[in-house]
Amino acid sequence: MTQIVTLTLNPALDLGAHTDRVEPGPKLRLSAPEAHPGGGGVNVSRAIAKLGGRSRALVSLGGPTGERLAALLDDEGLDVVPILSPGETRFSLAVTDAGGAQYRFVLPGPDWDEGTLGAAVGAVDEAAEADAYVVLSGSQPPGAPAGYVTEFVRALGPGRRVVVDTSGPALVELAAGTPPTPCVLRMDGAEAEALAGHPLPTRTDTADFAERLRVGGAAETVVIARGADGNVMAGPEGRCHVTAAKAPVVSAVGAGDSFVGGMVMALAAGETADEALRYGAAAASAAVVTPGTELCRREDFDAFLPRCVITAL
């Protein structure tokens, strides 16, 4: 199996708690918080582990919060390579009221500069084998320029296959097609519609836009999520859609990261792009039936995989 390496420059210690109601003014008494690892690349590695695979997780860790996050990752048995952070690792807080409404408070994280970003690229270059799949997932940290992902792909060279799931200016820059391009670029439907400048109501509309991004040099393969309607992929071998397994949604947190984990795990095992798309869809479906930040379970993934059907577009 080809090596998988994930990079998380802006991880978080995710804290979750409950209260009767959220309102301005009085002190809000919370329940004892639960702590979980957070951050795109971290969750991709966690999902891969839950599906029975292995990856090497490069994670930026700093200060006491970083130490606590490292302990949680160690408890999950992940192969973690710490990267020195330019500051204290951030935390986030999710508060759920008695009615089930959730309020999420997310801090920005420490500022990065050219030197610390370059050191992170060097760490990946040292940890990743020549043909590894390298996953860069999550929002880019404060201080990272919009073109950082492109420079990251260039620095790793042509052998490493970079899979990107990001947002904001970094996604806009990638969509412009500045070479060199990553192997896979994944985004959700809202991000795709923001880039397109108009709604993408049908699968064909989404596939047309994905193909336009691919031909324009955004990535070798472009994947766009359509929520409960599944995912669309445009690649060198054509365009296709995969259905999502029908299941009651308990929590959508981590569905995208689970998708990336399932898809990359299949690619690393030598599966075709279509089959990898099915693995991703099954992993995402497995994630939404678990509470909170639990991500996917292997038994749910196994049950959902046959229900994820590929159709050419």
Image (cartoon, rainbow, N blue to C red):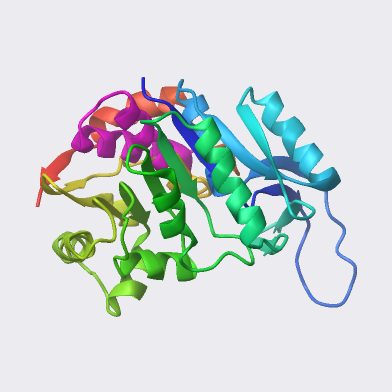
Which residue is pictured at 36% across the width and 74% down the height?
A: 194
In the displayed structure image, the side of residue 137 where residue 175 appears, left or right: left
Task: Tell me, yes or no, if residue 102 can be seen here.
Answer: yes
In the displayed structure image, the side of residue 310 where residue 29 appears, left or right: right
Which residue is pictured at 15% across the width and 64% down the height?
A: 208
In the displayed structure image, the side of residue 76 where residue 26 appears, left or right: right
Q: Position of residue 140 (x, y in %)?
A: 55, 60
Q: Position of residue 232 (x, y in %)?
A: 23, 52
Q: Position of residue 71 (x, y in %)?
A: 76, 31
Is the stretch drawn in magenta largely helix, strand or loop? helix
Q: Magenta stretch: residue 39 in it?
A: no
Whether 305 is drawn above or below 122: the answer is: above
Which residue is pictured at 62% across the width and 61% down the height?
A: 114
Out of 185 and 130, give the one closest to the viewer. 130
Task: Tell me, yes or no, if residue 248 can be seen here.
Answer: no
Quadrant housing the N terminus: top left
Which residue is pictured at 89% across the width and 72% down the height?
A: 26
Q: Position of residue 92 (x, y in %)?
A: 71, 56
Q: Magenta stretch: residue 286 in it?
A: yes
Magenta span: 260-289
Out of 98 and 88, give the one closest to the viewer. 88
Image quarter of residue 191: bottom left
